[in-house]
Image (cartoon, rainbow, N blue to C red):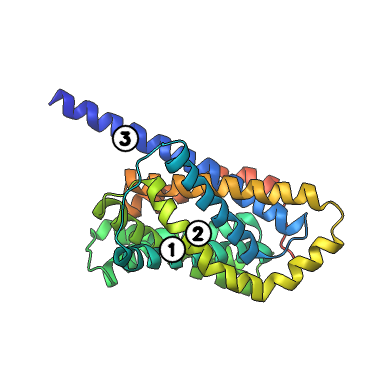
Amino acid sequence: MEQGRQAGGLGNLRALLAILQWWGFNVTVIIINKWIFQKLDFKFPLTVSCVHFICSSIGAYIAIHVLKAKPLIEVEPEDRWKRIFPMSFVFCINIVLGNVSLRYIPVSFMQTIKSFTPATTVILQWLVWSKYFDWRIWASLVPIVGGILVTSITELSFNMFGFCAAMVGCLATSTKTILAESLLHGYKFDSINTVYYMAPFATMILALPAMLLEGGGVVNWFYTHDSVVSALVIIIGSGVLAFCLNFSIFYVIHSTTAVTFNVAGNLKVGSFWTMLSSLNFLPIS
């Protein structure tokens, strides 16, 4: 009995530390991405996302094959396409929509919209996965939805395109979290192996659209920007932090559940609201 309580206490502590780690990386990456779009004038969300996934692929490879942090979990090619590719695709949509929304709306407003994610998670699990929830959980969604509506109506920097991107991003976040929970708990994956298999798929998905839609603009930016080297250091640095963020996301989901993960995301919004607002980031026109 005593050993069970100790194990439960250690599990709760591990989950708490994982959430705090995720909060830190999440807020840092959002701020740096906004800086890249606004201050560096690098307005290419697909390219930034692609850089992030390339860095995640390299980071996971080093962690498994060089540092031997975790043994490689072998996955059959069929399972890679059936289980990992769909999650990678949704993960891409989630990241891209987040970066797109940052171009048009302030960080604080984007994070407020993200508060809708627990609602979309519960609704999706109920509609698609036939999972039932207590009525108190449904009742708790009412103030969340109402708060998002009030905030959107009164937001001075409201932009419809950025708002829609962030809202669809909520659906993508919920779907990604549910699929990741199934993979981590069902397939017995760990967070590093999840990034190891997911990131190359995500890079493959984003590479062609990034080149076709943003390639010309990126080349032009290289010729016109004043401090290309320092800007590239910041962009690649954001990719390294994105690897840490991706790892921490799957670590939190592995340590908790999909709903807990998204509720923790709402707590993060409240905790960092003042700090984000004080940065006075404005939407890019």
Question: In the rendered image, which quarter contains the N terminus?
Answer: top left
Q: CA distance from mark 2 to mark 3?
A: 25 Å
Q: Quadrant of residue 64?
A: top left
Answer with mark 2 or mark 1, whichever residue precedes in sequence. Answer: 1
Sequence-wise, the earlier of marks 1 and 3 is 3
Say what amino acid the circle numbered 2 marks.
Answer: Lys
Q: Residue at x 54, y 41 (%)?
A: 24
Q: Measuring from the top left, give residue 260's x and y in whole percent.
A: 35, 49
Task: Tell me the residue that label 2 is attached to.
Answer: 114
Figure check: 204 above or below 35: below
Q: Position of residue 55 (x, y in %)?
A: 57, 51
Q: CA distance from mark 2 to mark 1?
A: 20 Å
Give the number of the mark in front: 2 or 3. Answer: 3
Q: Name the secondary structure under disc 1.
A: helix
Q: Which mark is residue 88?
A: 1
> Which residue in the structure is indicated by mark 3?
12
Please tell me whether mark 1 or mark 3 is closer to you in this view. 1
